Image (cartoon, rainbow, N blue to C red):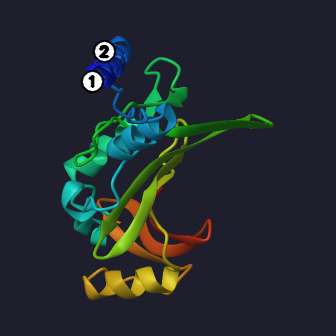
Amino acid sequence: MKARIVVLLFVLLVVAMAAFLLWRSGPSPLPAVPAQSESIQAKQEARASAPSESVDLGIALALDRLADCARSPALASVLDQMVRVDPQTFESRRGGPIRVPGYAQALVPTFERTREIEGNADIRAVVADLELAGRWHGLGVTGLRRSFYEESDVGAFQVRFAETPERVREVLDRQGFRLPPVGALREIDEEGMTTSLGIERSDGGAALTCTTG
């Protein structure tokens, strides 16, 4: 009888010690959920704020009016903001930031100004590019370009595409653009100023170009 009591007390002591040790150690922590790395978060934020290729620029900038090189108010506003011109010296500098319908953040163009003096001629050429990923009649638009000579009526602007010139011409001709062969220009009468429209090869893709002067 005494032996059974001794064994029972021993068992109770072991159980008590185990319970005490378990209490001291506390509950087992849950596996930690790995924190999302800053680089992944940055990529996701950039993706969310980047211009979306799903933006229909035909609607956002009313590009169909370009069939006769007519700029819609929305397109004219973007092109004008790509370059700032000093009203006193007529010198140009980079414009922006530019708010474009359908894009989460304002966009900043690139800018290049070159100067060449030949005798009495002071030739200052300006080129500004705006990366603008979107679509138009199923074509992939990559951006806009504005170019001109300071203190001159000579200038041009382009809608640039990822597709080949032949593909762009085929699609836009179906929309009534009446484009000439690739590399050629069709003149448009516009109140005494010479305006021309055409498709050309550009940077591995194509550009719909309107020129004046």
Q: Amino acid at mark 1?
A: Leu
Comparing 37 with 81, the one in front is: 37
Residue at numbered disc 2: 23
Q: Residues within 10 Å of mark 2 (few under 14, many from 20)?
A: few
Residue at the (51%, 36%) spot, across then down: 39
Q: Amino acid at mark 2?
A: Trp
Is residue 108 among what the camera can see?
A: no
Is residue 40 among what the camera can see?
A: yes
Residue 87 screen position, x and y as percent = 43, 21
* Depicted 84 relative to depicted 213: above or below: above
Mark 1 or mark 2, earlier in chain: 1
Comparing 172 with 180, the one in front is: 172
Q: Quadrant of residue 159?
A: bottom left
Q: Quadrant of residue 107?
A: top left
* Depicted 24 relative to depicted 201: above or below: above
Residue 53 screen position, x and y as percent = 35, 60
Q: Quadrant of residue 169?
A: bottom left
Residue 40 screen position, x and y as percent = 46, 40
Circle on res. 81? none
Residue 103 screen position, x and y as percent = 28, 45
Residue at numbered disc 1: 8
Residue at the (29%, 59%) spot, across then down: 191
